């Protein structure tokens, strides 16, 4: 395997240690090399080693004891694809699959891994769902998967429609009562900072929101605003919390009037936002950011002269907008791989505590968020 860049170094350590465990070179209860020894062995920083060991701990391969070190866990699960020769069936319960850009490459990576790990992937026709029937169709799809007795489910909670929270809660109850292993993708079904009962794979949205806020603060800004659509996913609250943390470090309190909830395609709403004094804005995602930039232009507000914007997701058109959009690139292929690994670990050890597995997004600095110098 080829590794490139600083972010990949912790994956190399993770893979090497895991391979030694699975080969039996590191047996049950055996102590791993110390963090200092791993730093010297791989020529990396201590936080890089810590991140690799933390992931091994999250996935149930090792235990870490304060003052003693890291040890191979007793009854460490075998590589999941070696457990059974019988193929499993996993379902995808993802609203608007085929319409949004983020989940298609994630699901494509899951599908690519199906042969390696001996499972089949079942897709629903979620692209055809309208806003009026998407909630009912999601619940119906969940019940259909339960009737089919799928071995596991990859689930993206519903958002952006009225009643989405109640629908998500009903779906969760159905899946819990059916004892189906579930890996939630991208966003938990409970509002931040609450945590649901299922494994979760995504990016650390608090850290991403913090990074977006620091970008404005590092340019000398003392105010930035946050904008999202109504009924947004719970990831949005985590991103907002990260923004608040950055402001708090700068001894700035984020008042309610800096937070805007509305439809950025409506010029009247955007005019209200800009009239409040907002000039530096963190948007919940790229779709919101692009819509905001378009409406602002219709109001003769130019980006970045009069308004600066940061988004999330790095959708295809963000780089090629009239003013290229500063955003966060979601590592979709890695997220798909982590989702499969998490599902297999869950099935190998159904009683393990629910885990949260993060992939690292890349901050892409572009013209839309650069504050002009006077």
Image (tube, helix red, strand yellow):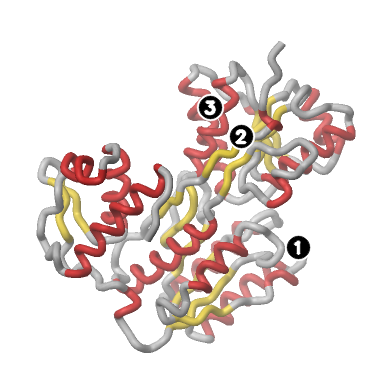
Q: Quadrant of residue 76?
A: bottom left
Foreground tag (2 vs 1): 2
Real-space CA distance between mark 2 and mark 1, rounded to the nearest whole angstrom: 33 Å
The tag earlier along the polypeptide, 2 or 3, is 3
Q: Give the left or right position of residue 236, taking residue 268 as reference.
A: left
Q: In terms of depth relative to the viewer, which is nearer, 252 or 311?
A: 311
Residue at the outermost top position: 374
Looking at the rendering, in which quadrant would you find the N terminus? bottom left
Figure check: 40 above or below 259: below
Q: How many marks?
A: 3
Label 2 packing within 10 angstroms: few (<14), some (14-19), many (20+): some
Q: Residue 98 in the image: state x and y as whole percent.
A: 69, 67
Look at 35% across and 47% down and name the residue there.
9
Query: Eyeballing the image, is 74 above or below 83?
Result: above
The secondary structure type at the circle numbered 3 is helix
Residue located beneath label 1 in the image: 131
Q: CA distance from mark 2 to mark 3?
A: 12 Å
Tell me the crowding category of disc 3: few under 14, some 14 to 19, or many 20 or more residues within 10 angstroms, Cα based. many
Provide residue 30's location: percent of width, then percent of height: 10, 59
Q: Secondary structure at mark 1?
A: loop
In the image, is residue 94 above or below residue 280? below
Residue in the image at 42% along x and 86% along y: 87
Does residue 137 sit above or below 48 in this rendering?
A: below
First in sequence: mark 1 vs mark 3:
1
Looking at the rendered image, the disc whose residue lies closer to the viewer, 2 or 3, is 2
What residue occupies the far front of the structure in this picture? 2
| Mark number displayed over residue 365 | 2
Q: Which residue is mark 3?
A: 214
Tell me what residue is drawn at x 41 percent, y 75 percent. 179
Nearer the N terminus, badge 2 or badge 1? 1
């Amino acid at each position: 395997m080829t590794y490139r860049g600083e972010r990949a170094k912790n994956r190399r350590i993770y893979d090497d240690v895991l391979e030694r465990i699975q080969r039996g070179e590191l047996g049950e209860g055996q102590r791993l090399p110390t963090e200092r020894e791993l730093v010297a062995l791989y020529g990396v920083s201590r936080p890089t080693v810590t991140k690799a060991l933390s992931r091994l701990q999250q996935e149930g391969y090792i235990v870490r004891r304060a003052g003693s070190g890291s040890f191979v866990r007793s009854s460490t699960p075998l590589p999941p694809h070696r457990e059974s020769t019988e193929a499993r069936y996993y379902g995808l319960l993802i609203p608007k699959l085929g319409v949004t850009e983020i989940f298609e490459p994630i699901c494509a990576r899951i599908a690519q891994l199906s042969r390696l790990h001996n499972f089949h992937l079942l897709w629903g026709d979620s692209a055809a769902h309208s806003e009026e029937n998407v909630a009912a169709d999601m619940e119906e799809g969940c019940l259909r998967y339960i009737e089919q007795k799928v071995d596991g489910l990859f689930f993206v909670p519903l958002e952006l429609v009225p009643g989405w929270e109640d629908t998500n809660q009903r779906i969760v109850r159905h899946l819990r009562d059916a004892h189906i292993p579930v890996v939630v993708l991208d966003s938990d079904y409970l509002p931040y900072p609450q945590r649901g009962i299922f494994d979760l794979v995504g990016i650390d949205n608090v850290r991403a929101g913090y990074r977006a806020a620091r970008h404005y603060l590092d340019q000398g800004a003392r105010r930035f605003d946050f904008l999202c659509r109504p009924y947004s996913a719970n990831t949005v609250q985590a991103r907002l919390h990260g923004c608040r943390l950055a402001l708090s470090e700068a001894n700035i309190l984020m008042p309610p009037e800096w937070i805007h909830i509305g439809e950025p395609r409506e010029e009247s709403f955007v005019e209200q936002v800009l009239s409040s004094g907002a000039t530096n804005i963190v948007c919940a995602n790229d779709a919101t950011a692009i819509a905001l930039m378009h409406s602002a232009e219709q109001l003769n507000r130019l980006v970045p002269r009069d308004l600066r914007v940061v988004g999330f997701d790095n959708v295809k058109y963000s780089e090629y907008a009239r003013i290229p959009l500063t955003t966060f690139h979601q590592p979709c292929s890695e997220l798909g791989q982590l989702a499969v690994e998490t599902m297999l670990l869950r099935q190998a050890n159904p009683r393990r505590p629910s885990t949260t597995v993060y992939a690292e997004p890349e901050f892409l600095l572009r013209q839309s968020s650069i504050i002009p110098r006077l």
